Amino acid sequence: MSKKPSYTDLMNRIEELESRDAEWRGHVRAEWGDDGLLKTSDRSFRDLVENSLTGISILLEEKVVYRNPEQERIFGPLTDDGPPSIYERVHPNDLEKLHGLIQATISGHARQEGIVIRFINLGGKTEGENAMRWLHCRTNLIELQGRKAVLINMMDVTKAREAERLLNIRDRMISLGHVTTGIAHEIRNPLSGINIYLDTAEQILQRGGDPEKMKEILGKIQAASSKIEAVIRRVMDFSKPSEPRLESIDIHQPIEEALGLCAVMLRKTGVEIITDLAPGLPPCKADVQLIEQVVLNLITNAAEAMKGMETNKKIKICTLQKGLRIVVSVADTGPGVSPDLAQKIFDPFFTTKKSSTGIGLSLCQRIIHDHGGILKVSHSPLGGAEFSFAIPVNS
Ligand code: ADP
């Protein structure tokens, strides 16, 4: 059976097709000085553009003034109502991304690798998610009749995206299958605890009921049930690939919320928290809840790594701006992560703990990846591990 192409294979194929387009881009530059593309008489150039497998559009002041046939196949032909805006039918969450790309192109800083943009209501399929298409867009700055124009190449990668999404879900399901025993174990222990506490509560009630003891038992039942809930929630989070809801946020908000949530745990375990949060950071584009989840996970991991230590248990959280990104780091004074483990710890279900799922870091990495960043581990100046990620500012 032939091997299904991976998403990377498909992207490489796109690169290959686009590099062929370099030839006609040369023509574009040569032609447009005097006459303008729309009137060009060069047949070979026209043939190249019109037969290209890549959708090609030309934008003047963010309006589409030309579409080649492949682009017309996706968007339909231009009509006599005047040039449409390039932002028509762009998914609302991708509007800023496309605007950023076009502005960067005009100012001569276009990203060579391009970006993937979602378009909606492009015809064919009619409802909901099905009507959405993923188009890989690359841009070039050109001159059209003495004015700055943007040449935009678009390749439909919807099928590749869909295939990748399904493969991801399948992989996660297979991985989940592998750890069902572990999950069952994690749930069974607190569940047995609940049953024992219930028996004890019954006995206490039969003996007339001691309110203090009952209160204690109820607290224990509650803790055990929360543990089961947490296991289920983590498994659900992992199997459900949720799209982040990106908003303009102050990065310190999710950090402070995460710190608030684990303050008691840190105090009880003797961990000192040091914060070095840069003042006046610009807002960034992020999902508050997901970033909070990542920071909470990193803090919990750091605290767990220092569990066996008697003294010098410290976690330092820093934020700083680096160019157009905001960097968040969580460092600790624990044993650190050895170079051979550093490769594995982001794998789903890799854990060195006796009763843990090993889901945390792979989930964190996926969240940061969805925010356009990478989660990295390094050696901390404090002596232990340092986990850091950088996400784009909301420009
Ligand atoms: P889990 O916490 O369930 O083991 P994670 O994916 O969160 O799953 O972590 C995977 C492994 O990475 C941990 O088992 C541990 O070995 C290692 N690790 C994570 N954080 C740290 C840290 N701060 N210091 C040392 N090792 C760490």
Image (cartoon, rainbow, N blue to C red):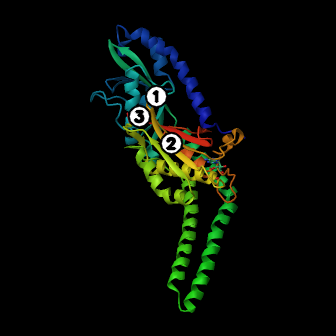
| Viewer-side label of 1, 2 | 2
Q: Quadrant of the N terminus?
A: top right
Q: Quadrant of residue 180?
A: bottom right
Could you tell whether 282 is left or right of 2 in the image?
left
Q: Is mark 3 within 8 Å of ligand 1?
A: no
Can residue 153 be seen in the rendering of this structure?
Answer: yes
Is the residue 71 above or below the residue 385 in the image? Answer: above
Which element type, helix, strand or loop, lies under badge 3?
helix
Residue 55 horizontal/vertical position (percent): 46, 27
Q: Amino acid at mark 1?
A: Glu
Please say if the residues under marks 1 and 3 sit with CB atoms less than 8 Å apart. Answer: no
Q: Is mark 1 within 8 Å of ligand 1?
A: no
Can residue 121 be seen in the rendering of this structure?
Answer: no
Residue at the image point whose x is 58% and y is 61% from the top: 231
Could you tell whether 276 is left or right of 167 in the image?
left
Camera-nearest residue between 123 and 36:
36
- Residue placed under numbered mark 2 in the picture: 370
Q: Quadrant of residue 46?
A: top left
| Viewer-side label of 1, 3 | 3
Question: Which of pointers 2 and 3 lies earlier in the amino acid sequence?
Answer: 3
Q: Quadrant of residue 225?
A: bottom right
Q: Residue furthest left?
A: 81
Residue at the image point whose x is 62% and y is 78% from the top: 195
Gap between marks 1 and 3 measured at Cα: 23 Å
Gap between marks 2 and 3 measured at Cα: 14 Å
Is the residue 190 above or below the residue 342 in the image? Answer: below
* Circle on res. 97: 3
Gap between marks 1 and 2 measured at Cα: 29 Å
Question: Which of pointers 1 and 2 lies earlier in the amino acid sequence?
Answer: 1
Q: Amino acid at mark 2?
A: Asp
Camera-nearest residue between 115 and 159:
115
* Circle on res. 70: 1
